[in-house]
Image (tube, rainbow, N blue to C red):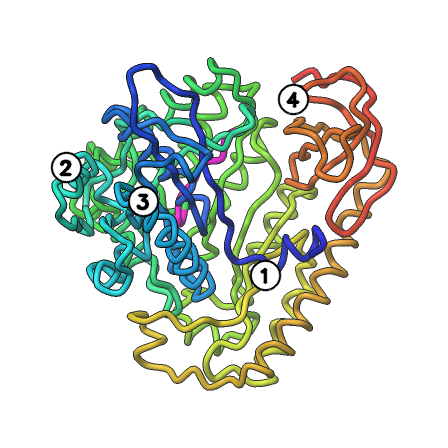
Amino acid sequence: MSSMEKIIDESVQGSSLSLENKNTNSRKLYIESYGCAMNFSDSEIVASILANEGFNTTKNLEEADLVLVNTCSIREKAELTVRKRLEKFNAIKKHRPHLKVGVLGCMAERLKSKLLEEEKIVDMVVGPDAYKDLPNLIQEVDAGRDAVNVVLSKEETYGDISPVRLQTNGVSALVSITRGCDNMCTFCVVPFTRGRERSRDPQSILEEVNDLWDKGYKEITLLGQNVDSYLWYGGGLKKDFVKATEMEKATSVDFSNLLQKVAEAQPRMRIRFSTSNPQDMTLDVVRTMAKYDNICNHIHLPVQSGSNRILKEMNRLHTIEEYFELIDNVRKIIPDCAISQDMISGFPTENEEDHQATLAALKYVKYDFGYMYLYSERPGTMAARKLEDDIPMKVKQRRLAEIIALQREHCKFRTEEHLGNIEEVLIEGTSKKSESQWMGRNPQNTVVVFPKENYKVGDFVNVKINECTSATLIGEALEYSTN
């Protein structure tokens, strides 16, 4: 699979995580994470909680005492991948009966006790808001009893836990700022698996960002199911903000305020964020991006469909015209801002006119890159309850192929715009294709490769862009950046 295909056609990411051994810990924890960046961030929280319970994480599955799989339910493919992994763990457990296996995350919350019944390998099922209960659940498992906690919280943000940084290059880190989602898109399970929106205390976010800088990190991504819904007024659900006191409302912090606070707290640290929602993103956020050089010029802005009829069926609370207006305003304020998308092909009732409207939307925006998928019916969602999955698979696949082909053209169009530019690149590691080259990203989140010379991981380097593919910029380093 090419780099471009990985960017636009990969729906599940898996990763095993590792941590340097601590002398005081004797049990071994192996974690695999699948799906969105929030799951990877959650795995770092889990590792931190269990480090205090005597567990070191390990990359070696064969030496693990506890295996945890942090799961995704957003698409059927993700769940199928997890089930295959559970089969592998079952084979290992036959030879190592002391091994305990737990399922975390959205799939755990959605399927609950069914995982214990259907997957005999599973000893423990823990939902996204119940990770602080892991010590108690492990005690239950150690005593030979199955353990389940999938209770959704109205308060939990894990803001008081310092995540253990795993699967890291020591350069970039995830910082969670919100949990849950109030936007009831009919295709999405997130509101049911992660609960209502609540935001983290901005002071705890700033403390985490400052600590990361002190530890040598150069870039953070502020993370949430919908970062534009961030709203801190002293705690509580976003939906309850209407009940807040006048003082709470006057001193509240929204996402644009938070971006400003983080940018000013660490002016030499790069700041990214994900994911945005068109109906919630304000131009205040875009203006804040434009004001601070250390906020990267990239917005991931899922559109899902170019058809107003399908957007309404999806319960996306914006029209395509409103979406285009937002795009136009972003480009007026930040002309070089990269914009990426999510797109669903074959949503129930989608006809050829709807599909052509999606292609027209792609042509209008010309996204820098995107993530495109076939519609996957998720049990429990409004679409699954109210709409028949009536688009034949061959039609879905043909439409998706047309979307991907057009996006590939636009990716090349956008990378070619960088030719001849001198751009600041943060070195993240060695290129996967050549040991003699570094790989990093520019502010637009585009991968850049260039000869190693005397630079090192974590350096900001000015690179002249000489060549490109549809996914990668190729250049030569000129000098260290002044960042």
Residue at 24%, 37% in the rendered image = 249
Secondary element at tag 1: helix
Q: Amino acid at mark 4?
A: Val
Q: Give the labeled residue for mark 3.
A: 179
Q: Give the labeled residue for mark 4.
A: 457
Q: Position of residue 273 (x, y in %)?
A: 49, 39
> Are circles 1 and 3 on residues that touch, CB within 8 Å?
no
Q: Position of residue 438 (x, y in %)?
A: 73, 29
Residue 121 versus residue 369: which sits nearer the camera?
A: 121
Q: In what quadrant of the picture does the C terminus appear?
A: top right
**Which marked residue is nearer to the observer: mark 1 or mark 3?**
3
CA distance for labels 4 and 3:
31 Å
Q: Give the labeled residue for mark 1.
A: 324
Q: Give the labeled residue for mark 2.
A: 139
Pointer 4 local density, CA inside 10 Å: few below 14, some 14–19, many at least 20: some
Q: Amino acid at mark 2?
A: Gln
Q: Is residue 397 above or below residue 272?
A: below
> Are circles 2 and 3 on residues that touch, CB within 8 Å?
no
Image quadrant assignment for residue 313:
bottom left
Span of residues in magenta: 220-226
Q: Position of residue 116 (x, y in %)?
A: 22, 58
Pointer 1 or 3: first along the chain: 3
CA distance for labels 2 and 3:
27 Å
CA distance for labels 1 and 2:
53 Å
Secondary element at tag 3: strand
